[in-house]
Amino acid sequence: MLLKIARRNLLRHKGKSLVVGIILFIGSLVMTIGSATVTAMEKNVTRTFIDSFMGDITIMSKKQKNEGVFMQMMGETTEVMADYAKTADILSGHQDVDSFIPYCYSIPMMLAGNDNPTGYPAICAIYAAELDQYQKMFSNISPVEGKLPLRGERGILLSKYMRDMYYLVNQDLYYPANTPFSAQYFPEGITNARHEDVSLKHNIVLMGYSARNSSGDVSVPVRAVFRWTRLDNFWREVSVMDIASYREMMNYRIGGDIVISRQESRLLEINTDNPEAMFAEKIETAGITAQKVSKPEFSRAAGKDDFDNNAWELIAVKLKDHNQKKRAVTIRELNNIFTEKNIDAKAVTWETFAGAMAGFIKGIRTGLFVFVSLIFIVAIIIIMNTLAMSTLERSAELGMMRAVGARRKFIGFMLLGETFTLSAIFGGLGIICGGLMSAIFSYLKLPVKNEMMQIITGNAWYAPEFTAADALTGIILLILVTVLSVIYPLRISFRISPLDAVERN
Amino acid sequence: MSALIEIENVKKTYYLGKIAVPALRGINLSIEKGELLSIIGPSGSGKTTLMNIIGLIDKSTDGTVRIAGEDIGQMPDQVLTDLRLNKLGFIFQTFNLVPVLNALENVEFPLQLQRSAGKKNAAGKAAQLLEQVGLKDYMLHRPAELSGGQRQRVAIARALITDPDIVLADEPTANLDSVTGKSILELMKEMNRSLGTTFIFSTHNRDVLEYARRIVTLKDGLLAA
């Protein structure tokens, strides 16, 4: 009887039912598509950050003060891990670790190319690793021209974006040696440029420096111009280099093998206020003995080919399980081991490593949540108001029911039945349509050109992913909206007395 | 043996802002089981107020109302609701039927609230009552499809379906033409006779008094001598 009355009342008040229904439909539709977008974003961001670039965890030296290495400024120090080998052993034996790769990352200065000494210097973020290992673990480099260097080969993979930038700033056009020149190498939109008008280059000169190291420079051949396979607009300023060239650029030499004589040390300590002393014929060398520089203290010894093959700044670690709670446990375990064994390493989340970038993504996610919440708040207010008006208009009818013996509970359940019926029909339809539209968008892969939007979509196209969890979230939110919308009308109905049946007539 | 309804010094005052408007100014009345009582009086004399208090849909400001020996003054809302459902039947001046239910469903409604009768039994009893009130052919009509007199008959059937001890009818003929009004009163008289149900109806129309076995007159909130 209760549901019968509820159902017929909805049909009797078609206009009001339709207003409430449409609001529920639109709210559910937007919420479902929004939820599918957030799901895609989270998945794509996870894929991009964890699977394609950073791993779940980053290991760095304990001396590294700014843990947000990825967003650090040019010239900031990325400390070298003093105990890479021991750290790698621990990671290899840890049950939660799927794979890991050591690498280095910094922002050296790009000096003018090999035959244009007058060009403007530029910066170039460099990710350096064993490139075959990198591709095996992350597989995120898609060469546009040229190809990846073989193991042991030196070279830089220049991002397409940075190649365009260097052309626009210096009119230097870099492209891989042994590759025929093509007018397509010019940045998009440059149509009138001619081969003869530009300086064509195959080598880049980079100068690495940090607060700890004095500068060194290295000339590396351009092996390929590439795009990042995933989220190119996000990483586009980062180029990739072989690790040997990087170590040379940063002067990471084998500190433990370097012997500095007292004499050399004395020379270094010479009083610069008295430059004459530097050219003295005789320098006191009595009692000179060799001393070793402690391992982390890298020193320059130009001309010597003694770069440290174990000099790594960072390790990207992929876990078997990407669950955040499990990751926190793994990080705690690793840090405990590092502390117990006095190893110069600490584990942080990729979000910490990504610094402000992770905060930015979190901000977008929060923004989407706030947007969806606002829709719901507006929907709740409109539905609540419509239902409250409807309840007041039906005072006589509800009062009569109370007069003939209906308890408040009956009236309440009747109103709940009406509202939940509307919710189930229109809200359910909204969720189904939202799911279908998400699937259609996902199939169409609508192109997204705006970079901000690309961060939301996680790709250069819009492909929301509607999952069972999204449907469940939608249903729970729909129930929540319905309950919140009906509270006030219910309170009104509870105040309706049998006397209203008499007085309202 | 005590009366079915005992009313002692019942007063009711309404407030229009700060102005007190007395509707009942001390009513004493005793109603026995099986009576067919008419409360008459001009408009504003307090008939509806008294009916509402007896029918448990309003509360007195002062005084005591006992139904079957129980003081209803201190009863919580839920108990009063259950009393209205199980012991009382109410016929409103404006019929007050559920617009979305047909005549049969409207009559069934109190039985459905009671949940004591099965669905089939409720429908059977409702059909029987509708037949008794002459609406055999209108059972599936909704209130909007019935005339005023037919709606009031449905209301009477609804008031009787729970076999109440008391049926209250507040000006049941006020919205009906004289012929239909008389037929409704005839029906109530017949029900009172055949079922032994106590009927109390209020009216300001002295033409219908012949249907009552006992008449009480209200004037300015007091029982007239």
Image: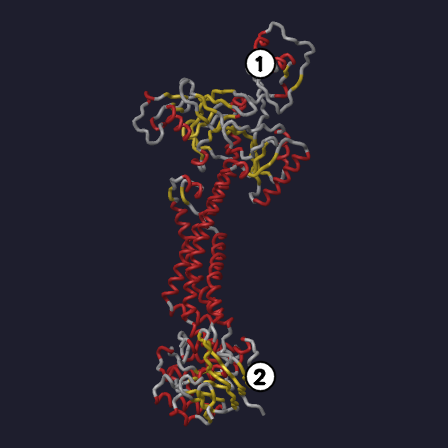
In the image shown, does B28 or B85 lie closer to the viewer? Answer: B28
Residue type, label 1: Thr
Are the residues under badges 2 and 1 in a single subunit? no
Relative to B144, is A471 above or below? above
Q: Count neighbours of disc 1 (C-alpha within 10 A) and say few if under 14, some if 14 to 19, many if 20 or more.
A: few
Q: Residue furthest left?
A: A192
Pinpoint the chain carrying mark 1: A
Q: Is residue A435 visible?
A: no
Q: Residue A253's quadrant in the figure?
A: top right
Residue B77: x, y in percent? 54, 75
* Residue drawn at (60%, 15%) of the image: A268
The residues tagged by marks 2 and 1 sit, at their Cα atoms, a distance apart of 112 Å
* Residue drawn at (57%, 43%) of the image: A321
Can you identify the residue that label 2 sits on? B70
* Residue drawn at (44%, 75%) of the image: B16
Relative to A330, is A474 above or below? below
Residue B90: x, y in percent? 46, 82
Q: Count neighbours of disc 2 (C-alpha within 10 A) and say few if under 14, some if 14 to 19, many if 20 or more.
A: some
Q: Is residue A155 visible?
A: yes
Residue type, label 2: Glu
Query: Which is closer to the viewer, label 2 or label 1?
Result: 1
Relative to A420, is B136 above or below? below
Can you identify the residue that label 1 sits on? A272
Relative to A278, is A25 above or below? below
